[in-house]
Image (tube, rainbow, N blue to C red):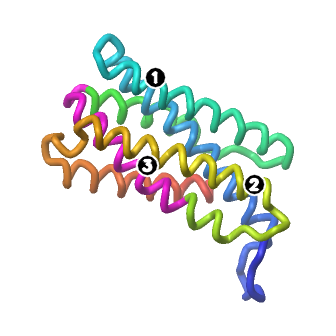
Amino acid sequence: MTSARPLPGDLSPEEKLARMIRVNQAGEYGAKRIYEGQLAVLGKTDSAPVLTEMLAQEEKHLERFNTIMRQRGVRPTALEPLWHAAGFALGAATALMGREAAMACTVAVEDVIGEHYAEQAASLGEDESELKSTIESFRADEMHHRDVSLENGAEQAPAYAALTGAIKAGTRLAIWLSKRI
């Protein structure tokens, strides 16, 4: 991992990578649970195919990060039980608000994840080219999810700005916590 001269209290390169992998696995797990919650409500509607496709990609991302965690000996976040419940609840709650709100949820989450993945990729050096490539590939998928959600009426959700603002704040908090706990 490329970095400037460390300061007292800075994480080691190994600790930075462990946090990166841990938070990415947690995020993909949370995304999977969001789509599962949305499908529990919208599974028999015309939204099901697009949600099912996004869920399948998140499951592939999660599987990849699970493998990376095992290979590198990184522990998962201790908050996984919380993300299990919270992800499903967020997905189901936004779906209960309507198709557009479910799509707005995806826009909000994927906007934050896109920024997060871009920052991570930029921080990785040549020595982590495989991890960087994985992150960049997954970021492209997440941005596609955001774009598909916009095409499917996300901005028509009731209180779109407030809804996406709240979900973005929650996503940023989940990222911060999952790195550390």
Instruction: Point out residue 170 in the picture as x, y percentages from the top left corner.
Output: 38, 52
- Residue type at mark 3? Glu
Secondary structure beneath disc 3? helix
Q: How many marks?
A: 3
Residue drawn at point x = 36 percent, y = 32 percent: 91
Is disc 1 surrounded by few (<14), some (14 to 19) or many (20+) residues within 10 Å?
some
Cα distance between the residues tagged 1 and 3: 16 Å
Residue drawn at point x = 73 percent, y = 73 percent: 11
Is disc 2 surrounded by few (<14), some (14 to 19) or many (20+) residues within 10 Å?
some
Residue identifier under label 2: 131
- Residue type at mark 1? Thr
Residue identifier under label 1: 52
Cα distance between the residues tagged 3 and 2: 19 Å
Looking at the image, tell me whether mark 1 or mark 3 is earlier in sequence order: 1
Q: Quadrant of the N terminus?
A: bottom right
Instruction: Point out residue 87 in the picture as x, y percentages from the top left corner.
Output: 44, 35
Residue range corresponding to the magenta coloring: 96-116
Residue identifier under label 3: 110
Looking at the image, tell me whether mark 2 or mark 1 is earlier in sequence order: 1
Q: Is residue 4 left or right of residue 179?
A: right
Question: Does 169 lie within the magenta span?
Answer: no
- Residue type at mark 2? Leu
Q: Quadrant of the C terminus?
A: bottom right
